Amino acid sequence: MAREILKVRKVGGTLVVTLPQGVLEDTHLVEGDRVLIEAIPPRRILISKEEMKMPTGRRAELELHVLEAKIESYHSQMDYAVADHNLNGGESETLDAQLKYLRVERDKIAIAVAEKKLQLFELEGV
């Protein structure tokens, strides 16, 4: 593990530390990368390179749209099952079982939607 003692300097109203090559060699950090800086009191600071897999509000929004589309898909499947039963006949017990199954699956997705909305709230605070 590379270690160096560096001087903190002031640029404008911000304190700046330059990261030397010896420290950067194993991190694969390049200009333009985003980093997460965390204070670890009383005397340490942790700098981590942001990973693309880090959850973001935008990703949570897209996942929410996918879940909502799945709910709509279950509604369409229920409508189709009823229409098919009305057109082609069949046993009412089979239709009832099919509709109950689709409702249960739809409700599971509704729970996932609520959880995703909570995650989005926590990410964005809105």
Image (cartoon, helix red, strand yellow):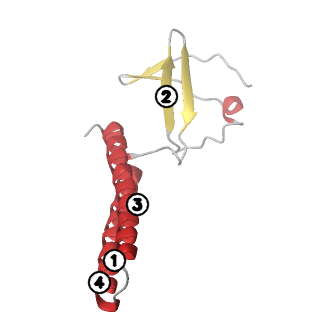
Looking at the picture, which amino acid does disc 4 mark? Ala
What residue is shown with label 2? 37
The image shows residue 41, relative to residue 87, as above or below, that is above
Left or right: 79 as drawn, with respect to 67:
left
At x 50%, y 41%, the residue is 34
Q: Tell me the SS state at disc 1.
A: helix
Q: Tell me the SS state at disc 4.
A: helix
Q: Position of residue 74 (x, y in %)?
A: 35, 68
Which disc is residue 83 wearing?
4
What residue is shown with label 1? 92
| Front in this rendered view, residue 65 or 87 | 87
Q: Tell me the SS state at disc 2.
A: strand
Looking at the picture, which amino acid does disc 3 mark? Glu
What residue is shown with label 3? 105
Categorize mark 3 by other alpha carbons within 10 Å: few (<14), some (14-19), many (20+). Answer: some
Looking at the picture, which amino acid does disc 1 mark? Ser
The image shows residue 122, relative to residue 73, as above or below, that is above
| Front in this rendered view, residue 126 or 83 | 83
Looking at the picture, which amino acid does disc 2 mark? Ile
> Are the residues at dot 2 and dot 3 in contact (C-beta closer than 8 Å)?
no
Q: CA distance from mark 2 to mark 3?
A: 42 Å
Q: CA distance from mark 4 to mark 1?
A: 12 Å
User: Nearer the viewer's eye, disc 4 or disc 1?
Assistant: 1
